[in-house]
Amino acid sequence: MPRQVIITTAVLIVLAALGGFWLGQRQVTLDASGVIESVADAHVAQHGGDRSQCVGWPGEDGAVFYVRCAGILYAVDRWGSLSVVDLEGGI
């Protein structure tokens, strides 16, 4: 195999490894109060109500936090994505 191909392949492998390492080190840091405030703001913007009625607690499985606002349970994953878990007020 030509030497130029081996050098180019090695450089691409090193760049891919460095890019993967860099992306792996980028983590979303979720602050409990910041998460609750963000979910409360989104809830009030969509449904109205009062921000002070929202409470949050650490999650389990795929959710990092759970936040309940006026009978709606939201789950927040480690990337900060918000999803509605329960509309009835269970848990």
Image (cartoon, rainbow, N blue to C red):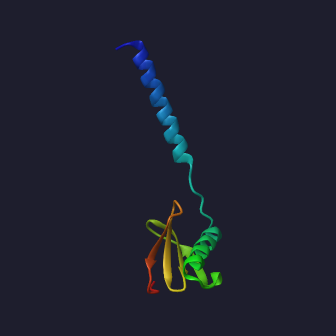
In which quarter of the view is residue 87 placed? bottom left
In which quarter of the view is residue 61 placed? bottom left
Q: Residue 32: x and y, percent?
A: 61, 69
Q: Quadrant of the C terminus?
A: bottom left
In the rendered image of this protein, does residue 9 appear above or below residue 49? above
Name the residue at 54% across, 86% down: 70
Q: How many marks?
A: 0
Q: Residue 14: x and y, percent?
A: 49, 30
Name the residue at 55% across, 81% down: 47
Q: Residue 7: x and y, percent?
A: 45, 19
In the rendered image of this protein, does residue 41 appear above or below residue 3? below
Name the residue at 63% across, 65% down: 31
User: Residue pushed farthest top?
Assistant: 2
In the depicted view, which residue is nearer to us: 40 or 63?
A: 40
User: Residue pushed farthest left?
Assistant: 1
In the rendered image of this protein, does residue 84 appear above or below residue 16? below
Q: Quadrant of the N terminus?
A: top left
- Asked whether, in this view, residue 45 is left or right of residue 60, the answer is right
In the depicted view, which residue is nearer to us: 41 or 66?
A: 41
Name the residue at 55% across, 42% down: 22
